[in-house]
Image (tube, grey):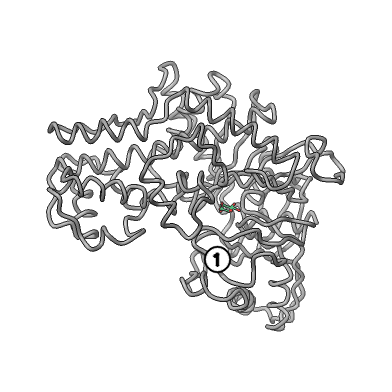
Amino acid sequence: MSDITGLGFSVGLASGALVTAAVHYLYSHAKGSAPAPNSVPQGPVAVSTPSAEAAIARLEKQFTISSSQLHAIVKSFSNELKKGLQADNQMFLQIPSYVSNRPKGTETGKFLALDLGGTNFRVCEISLEGRGHARTRQKKYTLTEDLKTGSGEHLFDFFAECVVNFLEEGGLDKSFATSLGFTFSFPVTQTAINEGALCFWNKGFSCDGVVGHDVVRLLQDALKRKGANITVKALVNDTVGTLVSHAYSDPQTYLGIILGTGTNAAYVEKVSNLTKWKGETPNGEMIMNTEWGGFNDPAVLPITSFDHSLDRASSNPGIQVFEKLISGMYLGEIVRYTITDLISTGELFRGASSEELKKPYHFETAFMSRIERDHTLELADTKAVLEDLLKVPATSLEDRRLVKRICQLVGTRAARFSAAATAAIIIKINKLDGCTVAIDGSLFEHYPHFANRMRDALHEILGLSAENIVLSQARDGSGQGAALIAALA
Ligand code: GLC
């Protein structure tokens, strides 16, 4: 357990704005020239021998998403978004978040937030200072495989223990009475702002005794067992938290997207369109958690044999198909399947593999980032990843170029799918004349060219209107969002 920020870390609202400016800068320099499908800023890597060229041509055909394919995805996606608003058990769960008010920026107070994402668990103390400013003290706790796959009670006891530990480190006794917002980044059917049952696990979690149960109750009971005097006021999906926290400083925020270990989006919908829900909200709006990772229309999604292999071997076959094409948990694994296939045909590493490469999920998405960022003539860092970390006996420059091209194809496809999904929502809510999309997650933040590739694809889909859309980096917004929602509740 390590304190990653120390006390008094203040939320990076200003730095989010800087990243937006950078994205704008890069975009405005690309303007005027229509981007080629799957264009990458540094151009595709030259791959020379006939066998490598044949392999690349084959893979480009499978992984490249053309403009017309993007348009077809947008159409089907829009259709499914509407169906999810009208009935239950659709491709998109379209879960009402019970959050209608976006913050005004004037809210104040001190709140606790728990944030369970895909990889980490964080406890945060958020001080809302008004004028769109907030300060955060937070601590990150690592989730072991045992916690992710053991008993639900064990998992929730761990959460409660972390909260007590966090309070004590802040000089507070566990009997200190406070309110808490719980960011729980999994599909939950919400029945109130502080009540909701888990539909199913994903992102490698499989704890028993949680599916079908109210996760607020499970947390509240665990806190009680540890003697903590805390009231769980709000249950929040990370996408909803990201949207709300960004809206605290930018009221034009209508979408919150996560592009990290998993992927999903929330957006502001009119309650009059939400015909499956019987209720009303003070302003006629509702923030919807789409659970877009569930999109799975085989008529428009060109799924490769590598994607199928990944899905079949996953803990949730046939589920979260879109998420498996896009998010950080899976991209490296798609590359691993592709590389393994080229080894079996003798097109890579002269047919030689390694034990590491045979292990599922051992080709991390972070390796793809390193490889895509490697601009050395000899692709030295790619060599280090393949030979030192993955123990491939020996690689030629040509092998490394081929691996780099595979990473570009898989990474670009993910960005283009993300853009199609984003465009579908923007069109659905009639915001082509301008809105801000708050995006959090390691893929968007750290994967080279991801934001640019999304921009290119948005331009292909929306034409000049793409210039009205701000893709804004929202760092660690989900915890702050949960605190704000607890404040609004
Ligand atoms: C998964 C979850 C979703 C979450 C997303 C990003 O798709 O189902 O609720 O928002 O991951 O963390």
**Which element carries disc 1, helix, strand or loop?**
strand
Residue 184 figure quarter: bottom right
Image-based side of 232 in relation to 415, left or right: right
Beta carbon at label 1 within 8 Å of ligand 1: no
| Crowd band around label 1 with a 10 angstrom C-alpha radius: few (<14), some (14–19), many (20+) | some
Q: Residue at x 17, y 36 (%)?
A: 52
Residue 110 figure quarter: bottom right
Residue 452 percent coordinates (x, y): 43, 33
Q: Quadrant of the C terminus?
A: bottom right
Image-based side of 46 in relation to 279, left or right: left
Q: Is residue 147 above or below residue 433?
A: below
Question: What residue type is disc 1 on?
Answer: Phe
> Considering depth in this image, is 383 or 179 the residue closer to the camera?
383
> Considering depth in this image, is 331 or 319 the residue closer to the camera?
319
Q: Is residue 24 above or below residue 8?
A: above
Q: Residue at x 15, y 50 (%)?
A: 351
Image-based side of 51 in relation to 419, left or right: left
Q: How many marks?
A: 1
Residue 268 percent coordinates (x, y): 72, 39
> Considering depth in this image, is 140 or 239 the residue closer to the camera?
239
Q: Residue at x 16, y 39 (%)?
A: 377
> Considering depth in this image, is 207 or 419 the residue closer to the camera?
207
Tell me the residue that label 1 is attached to.
Answer: 121
Residue 42 percent coordinates (x, y): 30, 31
Residue 101 percent coordinates (x, y): 78, 45
Q: Is residue 257 above or below residue 36?
A: below
